[in-house]
Amino acid sequence: MDNQDIAAILEEIADLLDIEGESVFRVQAYRRAANSISSLTDDINKVCQEGDLRKISGIGKGIAEKVQELLDTGEIEYFEELKEKIPPSVVELVQIPSLGPKKAKILYEKLNIQTVDDLLDAVNQHKVAPIKGFGPKAEENILKGIKLLRKSRERILLSEAYPLAEKIINQLQRDSQVIRVDMAGSLRRMKETIGDIDILASSDEPSEVSSYFCELAIVDRILAKGDTKASIIAKNGLQVDLRVVLPDQYGSALQYFTGSKEHNIHLRDIAKKEGLKINEYGLFKVNSEKQIAGGSEEEIYKSLQMQYIPPLMRENRGEIELAKQHKLPKLIGLEDIKGDLHVHSSWSDGYDEIKEMASTAKELGYSYIAICDHAEKLKVAGGLSKAEVADRKREIDRINNEMDGFTVLNGIELNIDNNGKLDYDDGFLETFDVVVASIHAGFNQSEEQITKRTIEAINNRHVDIIAHPTGRILGRRPPYAINLRTVFKAAAETGTMLELNSYPDRLDLKDDYLGEAKGEDVRIAINTDAHSKAHLKYMIYGVATAQRGWLESKDVANTHILEELRGVIQK
DNA sequence: GCCGTTTTCGGCCCGACTGTTTTCAGTCG
């Protein structure tokens, strides 16, 4: 039973308690604990063996005992009893927009509604409207909600949401009433997947902006529309929320709507202890109308005696404490990136020729690029024979002679086979400038096997970078079982770089792991794995992930200029 | 249920929108 399994059970307990009508604080306590365990980088089993679960924030006596019981016996008696009282399927009802725990409980108790299908039947027979607290509109909303739920898509990739948000922002900027407009929420924090798009605007006439927004061409359906906020479903099915505030409230509103929720709760708690109150309209003294700060986010943090916290760090993972001590890391930025060490060309499975890849990279301000086409064994991806590698080398040399102030590195992406063996012999590997190795098959092997394969590649003195180290593909393939702690140690010892793959559905290593890798002194290479020149721009997603993992420029190999990089590559 | 340089008890972030409850509870973010 891993961290995610346990977090899911605690979350389910919270759901059931919520419906049961338990104290919201107790419910919150379970949710907080679930959250802590789910974002823990250590294995909970190990934490448990090594000592006290209660050192995990949000876990006290009660939940520690229950988690222990779960690890020991495979179940929690308290949870089983809860499920006797409220069938777990009732929890599904709460997924329906407009239905919360209170109403779900009423529906279960009065009409014995246990599933979404039960509810659909009851609504169609108009049994719901007569119940106190419901009405005809409630039935209507439930029907709409169920429809929405059924067609609602999973969270979408950051790279899909981002352009749509940019488009909406452009359109809002055309409204003369709009003064400022920005992305907020998880989009501004650049989480790897996005549930809905949050947008904030400032205006002296908020209600007019809200109306303007609801009339945009992208709007399919309006969910709610008020003077200062509106929610719509866009034609592509994504929910977009707009908030509009007055100009002198913009900073506090942006801070508030950027989140994360956990970051904000912590911040407000701190404010409260100082006799202050934060809401979306500003920072105030308790019981006073006078705004102390609010025009800019910087003001808010400054008024709380903190450094400004970049949006990508606002996840309540210790950034607030560091900001109070003025010890925040100086995060890496896109402008620090000097080159891309893992891209493909039309020699293997890429779309564009080496020359085009190099020119585009140069336009992006890079000074080098490593063309790492697939090696011999990966036939499906057009892997290169030794002869083809030699032909390609001649082309690279020719391009390097033509290009000024830019270097194409002769690279290769090796396949780590099921036994940990690589495509070419050591003698041949010596001829490359950059050697990347990665796993492309055998994803279902045991943790021991996959870790061993990876370590063997790391131990090869010619392998410079392990690419996409966990193999996950967001929404399609979970990460394979691999002991990252062991991998980090080996990588640090041998000076092998681990990749942060910027491809939007990979982002591998993910943000949570980067901090741990940094702690082990592992050097990271942020690469795009571009298969076309357009993909080179995915670097922004890789850098965002690095920022979310608190990486600094010095932690990343391809922030070095070429001369320095060559030193790094020499193992 | 958790937590503590104001507390081991008594707090726990805060406000907008909706629908129906004639003064507010539930839901949502």
Image: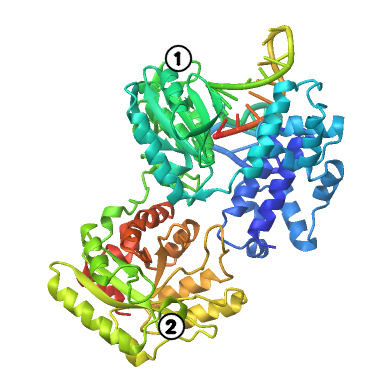
Q: What residue did someone put label 2 on?
A: A459
Determine if residue A206 is in view. Answer: yes
Q: Is residue A528 left or right of residue A80?
A: left
Where residue A285 sits, quadrant-wise, is top left
Q: Position of residue A431 (x, y in %)?
A: 28, 86
- Circle 1 or circle 2, nearest the eye: 2
User: Going 33% across and 92% down the picture, which residue do you hit?
Assistant: A427
Q: Nearer the viewer, residue A257 or A203?
A: A203
Secondary structure under tag 1 reads: loop
Q: What amino acid does circle 1 point to?
A: Glu
Q: Nearer the viewer, residue A30 or A130?
A: A130
Of callouts 1 and 2, the N-terminal one: 1
Q: Position of residue A566 (x, y in %)?
A: 25, 75
How much space separates mark 1 and mark 2, taking CA atoms?
64 Å
Tell me which chain the residue with mark 2 is part of: A
Tell me which chain the residue with mark 1 is part of: A
Q: What residue did someone put label 1 on?
A: A289
User: Going 31% across and 22% down the picture, which residue do you hit?
Assistant: A176
Q: Position of residue A150 (x, y in %)?
A: 66, 43
A204 vs A174: above or below: above
Q: Position of residue A375 (x, y in %)?
A: 39, 82
Q: Is residue A474 left or right of residue A68?
A: left
A425 vs A176: above or below: below
Q: Nearer the viewer, residue A547 or A104?
A: A104
Secondary structure under tag 2 reads: helix
Q: What amino acid does circle 2 point to?
A: Asn
Determine if residue A302 is in view. Answer: no
Q: Quadrant of the C terminus of chain A?
A: bottom left
A418 vs A108: above or below: below
